[in-house]
Image (cartoon, rainbow, N blue to C red):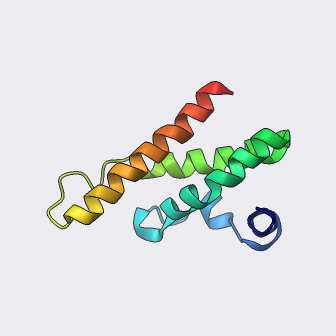
Amino acid sequence: MAILRRNYEQVYLLDYLQSPIITDISRGEDSYVLSFLPLLQFYRTSGDKNQYLRLKKLLLDIVDRMDDGCFVNKSWVDAKTAEHLKLFNRIFDHVRDMEKKD
């Protein structure tokens, strides 16, 4: 957790996630949601409200950009990708539920 926290707070350049110039969802933003969820939970339980709110906003912004249905019913989406999308939708729902609880 310490490495993830250090990378998020000091190493990663996250400007393009906060203010994307290109809104193409194939840029891999979904991977950030999955990898940062444990850190979000850490901030929540540790009481670091500022970092928690900052990271939560970032993740919710990504989720909102991903939630435009661009993969739904597309001929090029194979079965494996469709399964991944179902998983990500459950993860996105979890992030949205966290927003409702705060």
Q: Foreground residue, 99 or 41?
A: 41
Q: What is the quadrant of residue 46 in the picture?
A: top right
Give the quarter of the image for residue 1: bottom right
- Rendered-image quadrant of the C terminus: top right
Residue 24 seen in this snapshot: no
Find the residue positioned furthest to the left: 75
Q: Residue at x 83, y 39 (%)?
A: 49
The answer to whether 79 appears left or right of 4 in the picture is: left
Taking the image as shown, residue 15 lies to the left or right of residue 51, namely left
The answer to which of 77 and 68 lies nearer the viewer is 77
> Which residue corresponds to the image point at 69% horizontal and 48% vertical from the top-left?
40
**Measured along the vertical axis of the image, is residue 67 above or below residue 71?**
above
What percent of the width, then of the height, locates residue 98?
61, 34
Number of marks in the rendered image: 0
Q: Residue furthest top?
A: 101
Indicate the position of residue 18 as horizontal and vertical percent values: 64, 57
User: Percent x, y for residue 67?
Assistant: 40, 46
Residue at the image position 26 percent from the left and 65 percent from the top: 80
Hey, which quadrant is residue 39 in on the image? bottom right
Picture residue at 67% right of the left edge, 44% below the top? 56
Confirm whether residue 6 shows in the render.
Answer: yes
3 sits to left or right of 77: right
| Residue 16 position in % (x across, y down) | 62, 66
